Amino acid sequence: MSQCLNPDCLYQNLPSDKFCQKCGDKLLLGERYRAVKYISEGGFGRTFKAIDEHRLDTICVIKQFLPQQQGSAAIAKATELFKQEAERLRDLGKHPQIPDLLASFEQDKRLYLVQEFIDGEDLLKELDQKGKFSEKQIEQLLTELLPVLDFVHKENVIHRDIKPDNIIRNQKGSLVLIDFGVSKQLSGTVLTRMGTVTGTPGYAAPEQMQGHVFPASDLYSLAVTCIRLLTGCLLEEKNGTWVDELFDPMEMQWVWRQKNVSIGNDLAKVLDKMLSFPVRDRYQSATEVLQALNPVSIPPTQISAPPSPKPSQHRSFTEDLGNGVTVEMIAIPGGTFTMGAPTSEAESSDNERQQHRVTIQPFFMGKYAATQAQWKAVAKLPKIKYDLNSDPSRFKGNNRPVEQVSWREAVEFCARLSKETRRNYRLPSEAEWEYACRAGTTTPFHFGETITTDQVNYNGNYTYGNSPQGEYRQETIDVGSFPPNGFGLYQMHGNVWEWCADPWHGNYEKAPTDGSVWDEKYNDNRYQNSTDLLTKSGNDNRNRLLRGGSWVGIPRYCRSALRVDRAPGTRYVSLGFRFVCVWLRGLNSP
């Protein structure tokens, strides 16, 4: 059908008609865009599904300026906002999770925007159709949308209307942020002038309702979106009064936790901070929230030059897990290197100092991060202490790294594999990991001073040093996709974060120099094998180390010296692991 765009007509015509058979108005916009279906109507206009006849009938969206407010001042303001959306979409549409602007023009004394069509359902419809969101779904939502907001805010724009209706899950499963019609251009770093009150009640931040907006205002609205999706409780109008089960107006505080939501305390604390009423008490940027959610922290730097590792005196080997699944273990030679970052390294952190010399004994390390095929094979083996989900990963593929795996589950994997093979498999110490990653190099990355998405899977919307912007794949990729380092290890940078055995320490003061796991609290040999570590660390909730960066992280997080931490029960779509093998008396030699 061909939809007439005359607000007083809206007659459905035949697909081939050039003029409306009822009112006579022209049906094609700009001689190419044909509306085919009405979608929705808002305060500033109507939205139609359309086709572009100049591009093989490619589906697109037409937004028609049609303000509901009366009076010249109101219409002028609405016109300004509609034109503003065109400017914002022109600048922001280069991001893959924001619709691209295709055209903007006036026809028949009405303004139109034409933009990319996002084939999918918004999260409000998803909530209605599938029910309340789980903790894992909320974590995924934040992991996907926070980098988008970070990009938007760095373009000096605040969205101002984040809510489930304005988040669409496309056919590939990715979330897309839409409707920048009320977005605000920033002046300087924040908007502090009184402005027009815009946004949606029940989602807009309190300062926004007073005409002030900050990047933290969007974070507030995103958190409200999360708790409404978690609880299924939406703002409702009853007898002319707005009722919100999640907010106590007498105490002026959110009470969403009283809904008995099944959610971990770590995520709940992050949401509570995003929902703080005083702006200064919230996270001030999307990056800060990502640092709290994902184990991404202040970046690393290069180390002083170590001597080149001596040639290996032991040989690599392959472990057969059955049904065609194998594990390739690479022989890592012993040697001495300087661990940590000098103060001269740009953007380095105090938690990477003091630099210190560490001597590493020979060991074997997985050629790749643990794959989903390997995980499934080991998950079938008898349980040692913890159950293992045989298919925990969001991004499916036998040769992709397994993700959404906690530290305890990674140790359980190593314990099962050790028992089955009678070899000693375990997580690497932090020192072993950095030594293996560097492979004798001293630059920020084992391949040099800079990084590109042709070498590493990370968020290519961001750059490091003189490197160019690149591809943001928004998912993991197969483990052998890029060239290996000097030891023959693949993707030590990016793709997934990799757990290490060590508990977290805030710097390297009094760190061991023999490459062992650093745990001054316990001296019971628990780190010698994974079964003992499972048995003896059950009540040990100290945060554990992660290394290497991930697909969702910015490039500086992928550097060799970066060290971050997370609770041992944490699972995220960016968390995986790589295991090592060492010889112990009484077990099979590699």
Image: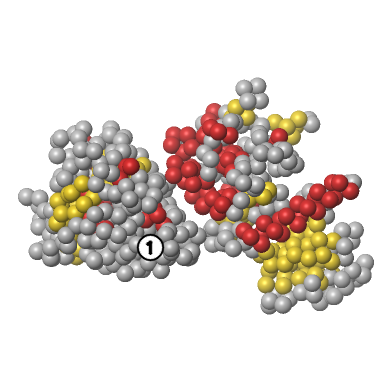
Quarter location, residue 230: top right
Disc 1: CA contacts within 10 A as few (<14), some (14-19) or many (>=20)? some
Is 275 located above or below residue 326 in the figure? above
Residue found 80% across the figure and 75% down from its top: 31
Which x, y percent locates residue 564? 35, 45
Q: Residue furthest top?
A: 250
Image side of residue 36 versus residue 361, left or right:
right
Q: Residue furthest right?
A: 23
Mark 1, residue position = 450
Is 42 located above or below residue 465 in the figure? above
Count numbered badges in the picture. Answer: 1
Which x, y percent locates residue 473? 47, 63
Name the quarter where the N terminus is drawn.
bottom right
Q: Residue furthest front?
A: 344
Which x, y percent locates residue 320? 21, 64
Residue found 30% across the figure and 52% down from its top: 561
Image side of residue 514 versus residue 21, left or right:
left
Q: Camera-side residue: 337 or 50?
A: 337
Q: What amino acid type should be assigned to the residue bearing mark 1?
A: Thr
Quarter location, residue 173: bottom right
Which x, y percent locates residue 470? 47, 65
Secondary structure under the numbered disc 1 in the rendered image: loop
Quarter location, residue 99: bottom right
